[in-house]
Amino acid sequence: MLKQTLSQKLLQKLSPQQIQFIKLLQMTTADFEERVDQELLDNPALEKGEDENESPLPITSDSKRDEFSNEDSLNDDFNSTDSYESDEFSVTEFLTGDDQGASFRMTDDYGDEEQKEIPIAYQQSFYDFLVEQTQSNFEEGADLQIALHIVGNIEEDGYLRRELVAIVNDLAFTENISTTEDQLQRILTKIQNFDPPGIGARDLQECLLLQLYKKDYGGNRALDLAEKIIAEHMEAFVKKHYDKIKHALKIDDDELKLALVEITKLNPKPGQSQSNSKSQYIIPDFTVINDEGQLNVILNSRNAPELKLSHSYSETLQAYEKDAGKDKNLKDTVQYIKQKLDGAKWFIDSVKQRQQTLQMTMRAIVAAQKEFFLDGDETSLRPMILKDIADKIGMDISTISRVANSKYVQTDFGIYPLKYFFSEGITNDSGEEVSNKEVKKILSDAIGNESKKKPLTDEALMELLKEKGYLIARRTVAKYREQLNIPVARLRKEL
């Protein structure tokens, strides 16, 4: 027997316009430009250029830092979601109504400079480089097909991690080629003589040995020792147990040093010498300029396209208004035009709100980290979390997170990701809260100046910080060291 019940649920739903705004907000400058170009192609009611009937909306850089718009003002245009639902509408009212988002342009003192793209030269892919060598070293036939299959399994860093027995099965099932592991090994050995040295290795040990074999012309004592260390004492070498190596090979410190010099010249990832991707350039989304102590925030002009509604679409809609009620097909056409104009207005509104949100967020960050933007000293960074900025400008933490995770700012001291300015706080022995970046800087400097024969342990680093007034546990020191990509003391040891 069916049982009917009533229940209440509270659900949070986003309108299509809000989803569009969120997606635009988290885009980088390059992705945003591409998205705008795509929208211009997809929606004929949207055009690039300034609307003559509407004055541009400037976002200047000299506004007061402590005055931020309320979040509600950014979302006012997102409250109406029934544009597509009503069949009855007034064309005149639609075209002459609230059109604050109908066009938008940003002007600033730095926006008139010509934006020039950095040319990116063509670069042969790593795979094509290997294929070219394969075709030169193998004659037409089964061996060439097998060699090309092996090359296709070599990963971007230059290693062949797929087992030979698996490749045997792959060739049998996919290319109907019957072969053996011995035949594959013979062909792989030939491939391992390709450039760059070390290509086609199954592990790090084989990779280093392949490079040493190519360098060893005989009579070089250091290379001979390097080969023995990698071939016979790889584990001790990785763990830097140099005393064990010296004892096993019956060599002194000077001989070991010469062998280690040869090993450090080797490339553990030979595939990186032939990049298979184009160079990536960081496009700063903001520029912070220090004008005699006054910090000005400039939004990259590439984030401020001049967008407007198509006049031809608007005029067509007005012309069809009189006859729309008589002809059903004409009414459908009018509805289509209205939807395209609606979509164009929503997109322009989203672009405008994206720019306002970016500006307010960046100004709040600059206000909170003013000392850093004035002098560039990393130790002057103050503890700051996403919630601090969210509370200051009256927005949600997730909005600030979307801005901080994908944007960059150019300063007088270099280009920084926005998330660089967010850090946890640590209280020193004076009761003052400082950024953990200050502690990391001290750790980095201490390790950089340590004796490599006797590196500082995490315990020693903890005591050093304690002397400077930072009461931090050893496990916290280890966490910060790992975040700095610094290995443990044993692996930093040198002869």
Image (cartoon, grey):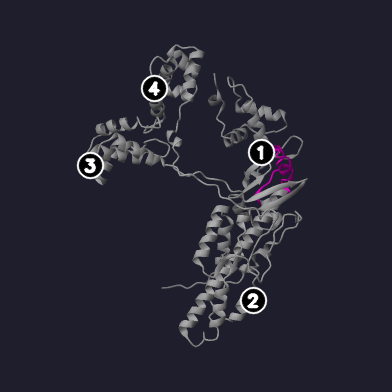
Mark 1 vs mark 2: in front: 2
Q: Amino acid at mark 2?
A: Gly
The boundaries of the magenta stretch are: 367-386
The residue to which callout 3 is attached is: 177
The residue to which callout 4 is attached is: 231
The residue nearer to you, when weighing 289 against 237, is 289
Real-space Cα separation, disc 3 to disc 4, in angstroms? 34 Å
Residue neighbourhood size for the residue with mark 3, other residues' Cα within 10 Å, grouped as few (<14), some (14–19), many (≥20): some
Q: Quadrant of the C terminus?
A: top right
Q: Is residue 427 visible?
A: yes
Of callouts 1 and 4, which one flags the residue occurring earlier in the amino acid sequence? 4
Q: Position of residue 60 (x, y in %)?
A: 72, 57
Kindly identify which numbered label has been placed on residue 437: 1
Real-space Cα separation, disc 4 to disc 2, in angstroms? 79 Å
Contact, CB < 8 Å: mark 1 with mark 4? no
Kindly identify which numbered label has been placed on residue 97: 2
Of callouts 3 and 4, which one flags the residue occurring earlier in the amino acid sequence? 3
Of callouts 3 and 1, which one flags the residue occurring earlier in the amino acid sequence? 3
Q: Amino acid at mark 3?
A: Ile
Is residue 374 in the magenta section? yes
Q: Secondary structure at mark 4?
A: helix
Residue neighbourhood size for the residue with mark 2, other residues' Cα within 10 Å, grouped as few (<14), some (14–19), many (≥20): few
Q: Secondary structure at mark 3?
A: loop
Check the image and report above or below for 97 versus 230.
Answer: below
